[in-house]
Amino acid sequence: MIRPAMQLLAAMAMVPALAHAQWARTYEQFYYPAPDNWVFRTEYPGADRLFNAFDYGHAILYELLYTRPAASPAILEETQYDFLTTRLLVSPPRLPLKEMAIMPHYTRLAPEAKQMFEWAHILHRQVYDVLADERLDDARRDARLQELTRYYLSRRDLAFSTRPKSMALMQEQFYSLAFRERYPKFNGLIWGYHWLQVGLYEPLVAGRSRAERQAGVGAAVARFRQMLTDPPRTLPYQMPMTTVIAPIFAQRYPELAIIFDNLHSMHDVISDILASDKVPKGRKRAEILLAAERYRDDTTEVMSVEGWRRMSDMMGLQNMGGSAVGFLSELPTPTVARGLVMRHDKDGNMIGDAHEGHGAAMPVDSAAKDAHAGHVMPTPVADPHADHVLPAAPPDSAGALAAARAFHAALATSDSLGALALLLDDAIIQEAGRLEEKQGYRSGHLAADIAFAAALPAVRSGWKVRMEGVTAWVTSTSSTTGEYRGRQVDSIGQELMVLRHGDGGWRIASIHWSSRTRPSR
Amino acid sequence: MSYSTWSASRARSGSLTRAGIRAGIRAGIRAGGMLALAGVALTMPASEVGAQTDYYNLDRGRPLRVEDALPIERHAVEWQLAPVRLSGARGAGSTLDLEPELAWGLWPRTQLEVGVPLARLRREGGSTVGGAGVDVAVLHALNTETTSLPALAISARALLPAGPFGPSRPIPTITALATRTFSAGRLHLNASASPGQYRPSDRVDEGARWEVGVAADHSFVFQALLVGADLVVRRPLVGDDAPEWSMATGVRYQVGPRLGIDAGVGRGLSPGDEWFVTFGSALSLSLLHRFGGVR
């Protein structure tokens, strides 16, 4: 029996080499210990318990989206929603839940992302503790929150960036909107959760006495419950942004507010990845990890802090569930359709082509319109994806070739954002007898191109570049061999890209692909 | 850390009576209560925050002999306050074991455990109390569970000579651990081996030449409660007796954010084999601030 045990040990030592793709080594870390630990639980037990129920809502959502992608939406929209709102939120668990036991399959799929959430949720709770601790004056409270933030950021493998991220990460990927389209009610519930999670900071910061803070937290909880009365109409129509829902908190602690907005944004991204049938099951882990990396780094889709505030304002307080303090008895009237996608540049200015969301459109009350309603006149601005564009340089053939190759590299590495950033806004893509504009390509054939390029990298050769002024024609041939989705592929292709040079360097104006099966040899 | 089957041979050397069992239980409750009070008194001033879902993290011997492949969190300190184990066998005396133990999440995925087992042997002629060695162990998780792989960990431990019931020479043990999670619960596999040749005079009743255990558990997440059962087979370090089979079942319950308790029962599968009852509690805290906090 010793021999089998030793063999097991030896086999375990070899496992990393045998299964590299599935090898994960993320780990848990303890709360930062301090005298204020658990104060929120003691001072505000009702609100604290609600967060335990929120844990379940997030967990069961991911587990069902991943394990039962083809199941009827009613399982989430009716069965789980009803369980949550009529039972669990009414009588929440007394302790935080072990999410691994609720969502084992999702946790196994992406333990790194799950750990990122857990680490940020710990921060969430510890910030409540600090703000709820009546023994701390403002200076000590600020110092404690700085300490907590530093502790949180010490886990660079888990911490969300303290730089605001563009909503393009959440709403302009090839898988984006899948969740809100299919599950509008549950999506609204998640936004309701996020409204309360950031909204509770405001009465804790704005209250001038313990009595005011107690009353403010109680009112915010009551407001959250009011949101559940007629779903999805009464639930938020846009992702609640901290700087709008809790402006005093966000002004005082911008790093924390940005972290929480990035956290909530990534919540939606993962819901989309799991819900989208454009992301094959075998690609979901890679897309989740890619998204996680983008929310951790300080470079991808970064906005200025002022831009983040401006963008949040333009999305509209009334579309996010309204203020968390000093609100009227009636819920605010949204001014946009549920789930409307608004595009912004990195300075928070709205870009013109906001398109309708996928819920029932809310009749817009003209009296309710204001400057924050998301209908601001578009201003001529740079593309929000400008970060991904090659550095501007004088027009040269090498730069054009590099841009063309970068586009293929982006496809092969599933970097949809990078690929889209290389396309001009009016770019057209012609393939297989179809013509798609950039927007159509983003939500249409891009996913398939990425899946194919990632699965079967093409061998490209015969690159030729011809230039005339700021226009370049790049041609190449490709050879693709292998098995894709159960069929043998052995094809050769021709590609023509037309690129234009501008302030952002070389970008693609059009692509034409033509391929055929390789003739028998 | 565990006494899982360690006490069997000690117990067999005496006789088991109802009065003996009752006295053992009373002594266990007294000792456990004192340790719990001491633990609370020592840790309260620190006001640390703890692992709120510690009930989910199986510790060896609390209450199952099989452990999961999950170490405690980095920077966490878990103090097992009053792990009491009462055991006996037909025709033998009862043994009460106590092992205060400290586990520390020293590095990422790595915990250090130090236990100081104490034993009280009760026989018809009276009882004897004494140390049963010093137990030092390091558990390192190799990975986090993923779609294709279970959570895997290795553990190296040594029971060092100390006290009248401890071994006369160190007993090293290497263990491989695996945990797989399903919707219905988790499966755990432990396989361990203790290399070396031992004689009866080495007082190594507690050790096993090899031991293999499998366990299953299920969590009731809303109640913060875990129930589980295990099946263990082992061959003692000394002698050529047939492998010993035993099984146990138990529960772990999270009382509050920092405090968890557990209880279990088990017995050998051959007539006359040992039975045992366990009860324990664990307090989670952190020593991070003692070392100046995060830098």
Image (cartoon, rainbow, N blue to C red):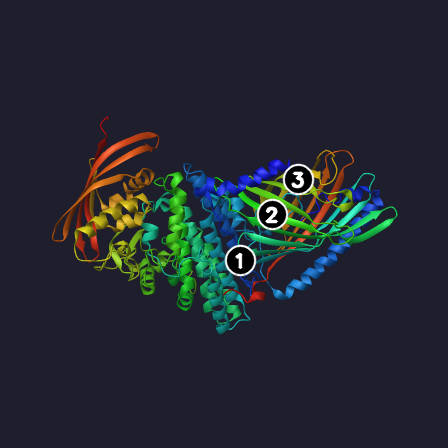
Q: Nearer the viewer, mark 1 or mark 2?
A: 2
User: Is residue A183 visible from the viewing direction of this image?
Assistant: no
User: Is residue A410 visible from the viewing direction of this image?
Assistant: yes
Label 3 marks a residue whose chain is: B
SS at badge 2: strand
Q: Which residue is the extreme one toward the left?
A: A468
- The residue at 65%/40% (across/down) is B229
Q: Amino acid at mark 3?
A: Glu
Relative side of B132 to A312, left or right: right
Relative side of A200 to B239, left or right: left
Q: Residue B211, which numbered label?
A: 3
Residue picked out by circle 2: B155
Residue picked out by circle 1: A48
Question: Picture quarter containing residue A365?
Answer: bottom left
Pick the front one: A38 or B101: B101
Tag 3 near tag 2, CB within 8 Å: no
Pick the front one: B232 or A143: B232
- The residue at 64%/66% (across/down) is B45
Q: Amino acid at mark 1?
A: Asp
Measured in 3D between alpha carbons, the distance from the residue under mark 1 to the one under mark 2, in whole angstroms, is 37 Å
Label 2 marks a residue whose chain is: B
Local crowd at mark 1 within 10 Å, few (<14), some, or many (≥20)? Answer: many
Q: Amino acid at mark 2?
A: Ser
